[in-house]
Image (cartoon, grey):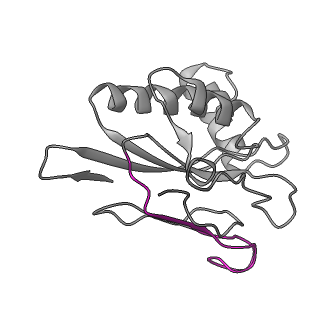
């Protein structure tokens, strides 16, 4: 979703899902369907998770080079701070992304899946997105019974939900 402001600012919000690695016997999972597509249609055996990361970073980089402000809501299915995708998002020189809860509150996210022990879902933003509020609701209080929600607001924008279990106020003056 893209928003254009009076001042010529363009903000793009993207919601993504990085597929969970699954066994070949689980033929109907997103991961195995993507693996089949890339292998059969494109003759490419690259892991779908690697493809997702490469394609996402290429798309976000192109938008950033156009001067767009970015909001990325992502089910990373990997630790958002120490996993490969999370590290790539915050360290890529063209992106300048920050995980929004940590950047706004100074607090790391905790587990974001009811069977998990680590944060695998988060919102990342570029520094030119002003976060007014960010809220991450505990597991069981979000949309549905097992997925917590996170809400972020910025001037002139509303935010979609993503799965986070922390409720905190941004730090500031």
Residue closest to the eye, 113 or 138 = 138
Does the segment drawn in magenta span residue 139?
Answer: yes
Query: Residue at horizontal 72%, vertical 66%?
Result: 165
On the picture, is 137 further left or further right than 127?
A: right
Query: Residue at horizontal 35%, vertical 30%?
Result: 64
Residue closest to the eye, 20 or 66 = 66
Query: Residue at horizontal 74%, vertical 46%?
Result: 20
Residue closest to the eye, 116 or 137 = 137
Query: Residue at horizontal 56%, vertical 25%?
Result: 54
User: Which residue occupies the extreme front position in the image?
Assistant: 173
Main SS, magenta region, reads loop
**Which quadrant, please, contains the N terminus?**
bottom left
Where is residue 117 shown, x and y percent of the image? Answer: 87, 56
On the picture, is 66 further left or further right than 84?
A: left
On the picture, is 157 further left or further right than 81?
A: left
Residue 138 seen in render: yes
Region in magenta: 129-150
Does the segment drawn in magenta span residue 92?
Answer: no
Where is residue 47 shown, x and y percent of the image? Answer: 70, 28
Above or below: residue 57 compared with residue 102:
above
Where is residue 169 shown, x and y percent of the image? Answer: 58, 66
On the picture, is 27 further left or further right than 66?
A: right
Q: Quadrant of residue 37?
A: top right
Residue 51 seen in render: no
Where is residue 80 shown, x and y percent of the image? Answer: 70, 43
Count of picture labels: 0
Q: Quadrant of residue 52?
A: top right
């Amino acid at each position: 979703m893209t928003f254009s402001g009076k001042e010529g600012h363009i903000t793009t919000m993207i919601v993504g899902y990085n597929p969970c690695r699954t066994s070949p016997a689980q033929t109907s999972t997103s991961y195995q369907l993507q693996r089949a597509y890339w292998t059969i249609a494109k003759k490419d055996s690259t892991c779908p998770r690697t493809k997702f990361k490469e394609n996402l970073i290429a798309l976000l980089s192109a938008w950033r080079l156009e001067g767009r402000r970015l909001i990325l809501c992502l089910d990373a299915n990997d630790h958002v701070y120490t996993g490969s995708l999370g590290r790539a998002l915050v360290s890529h020189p063209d992106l300048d992304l920050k995980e929004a809860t940590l950047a706004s509150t100074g607090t790391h996210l905790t587990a974001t899946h009811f069977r998990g022990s680590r944060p695998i879902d988060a919102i990342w933003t570029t520094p030119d997105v002003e976060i007014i509020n960010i809220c991450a609701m505990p597991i069981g209080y979000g949309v549905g019974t097992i997925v917590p929600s996170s809400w972020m607001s910025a001037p002139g924008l509303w935010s979609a939900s993503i799965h986070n279990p922390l409720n905190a106020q941004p730090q500031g003056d």
